[in-house]
Image (spheres, rainbow, N blue to C red):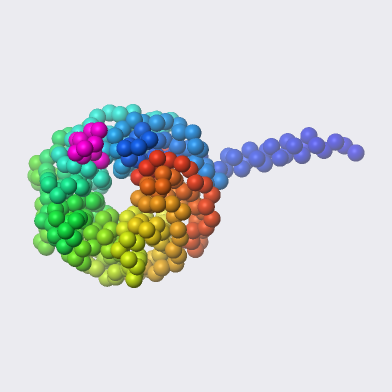
Amino acid sequence: MRNLWPLLIAGSIGAMGVQAALAEDYQLLVGSYTAGQSQGIYRMSFDSATGQINPKPLQVIKSENPSWLTLSKDQRQVFVVNENGPGQRDPVGRVSRYAIDPKTHVLTLIDQAQTLGNEPTHSSLSVDGSHLFVSNYSVAEDPGGSLAVLPLGADGRLQPVVQMSSHPASRVNPERQMSAHVHSTIPSPDGRYVFSNDLGADRVFVYRFDPKANPDLPLTPVTPAFVQLPPGSGPRHLLFSADGKHAWLTMEMSAQVAVFDYHDGKLEQTQMVDLAAGQPVSDKAGAALHASKDGKFLYVSNRGTANQLLVFAIDPATGHLKERQRRTVEGDHPREFSLDPSGKFLLIANQKSNQIVVVERDAGTGLLGKTVQKLPMDAPSDLKFLLRQ
């Protein structure tokens, strides 16, 4: 009989080669806090076939408290807030801009700018890419939080802050709401409005964005100037639906999600969802929220002592949420999380237990499955995927 082993081996190698070719390797940027062992930003390799992050970083970028990463639309640049403040190694709040090599994804620091506030915790780009909105959270009551607007040059270069906005505090919670604490600022899908979520004020402040009319003051408050949220709720992050007709808002202190209809700068609340109904205050710390690429599911993290991820089905007509699953994050303080580009996995940045946890995801049902990896990582705070160019 003819020896078939060489053919079988060759066939096996060929099949493995095809599988390898079909597998997508992506690169992942990890932001972190640097009071402990972390050096800053980590560029990692992620295998979407297995859900594994390669423990050996492709690049380590030294940076002070790079807690939030904002990618440009073309992924040629990333804007990083350095969440610095009094008592830290660098007491000055900053934003840093890095160029991303389109072939290798190597990051190179280009420039920095001060945010004129303490502990900048979030940034976003205007839809036209002309301005960066930075949310200075400011842990201390004095000077309190603020929204900073930084223009970008034609080459993307960071310009000095041209406008600052601050808001009156609700003063409902004497420990956390005695001054403004701007947690995030998000442009509307059409780019004409900007929504600033202030944990200290229990309000979402609404601005018209028109830099052509007034380059020195590109934001103008609309009428009414804010969306009122429940006293002591602490609004944190806002997310618009893909079609721009709805929006969801996490409220950190009450661990709730508000659902809105959206039209022409106006948010109208239509539903309020509790993440920790009937649970003690220690269980309540709503944080991140992200929708699946197909728009069918919303994922929300609740920190505190609960440390859960909640999965909701989204009603396409109303944007309303129906709970499908609660799952432990198998760690402490899930500050951020990210769905991988394939949609088969969800990655969780557990800040206080110093790990990134990768879990399986069923794209059809939206449900989260077994844990496939727990990667030690000191104080991870944000996860952003880089797509192939």
69 and 35: which one is in front?
35
Decide whether residue 92 is among the magenta residues.
Answer: yes
Identity of the residue drawn at 27% across and 70% down: 270
Q: Point out residue 36 in the picture as x, y percentages from the top left corner.
A: 35, 37
Q: In the picture, which quadrant includes the N terminus?
A: top right
Identity of the residue drawn at 34% across and 54% down: 288
Q: Is residue 182 left or right of residue 246?
A: left
Q: Is residue 191 left or right of residue 312?
A: left
Q: Is residue 16 left or right of residue 238?
A: right
Can you tell which quarter of the image residue 177 is in? Answer: bottom left
220 and 237: which one is in front?
237
Identity of the residue drawn at 21% across and 63% down: 232
Q: Point out residue 282 in the picture as x, y percentages from the top left corner.
A: 32, 61
The correct choice, above or below, for 269 with respect to 138 in the image is below
- Magenta stretch, residue numbers: 83-94
Identity of the residue drawn at 34% across and 71% down: 278
* Residue 95 in view, yes or no: no
Can you tell which quarter of the image residue 29 is in? Answer: top left
Q: Is residue 362 left or right of residue 3?
A: left
Q: Point out residue 83 in the picture as x, y percentages from the top left corner.
A: 25, 40
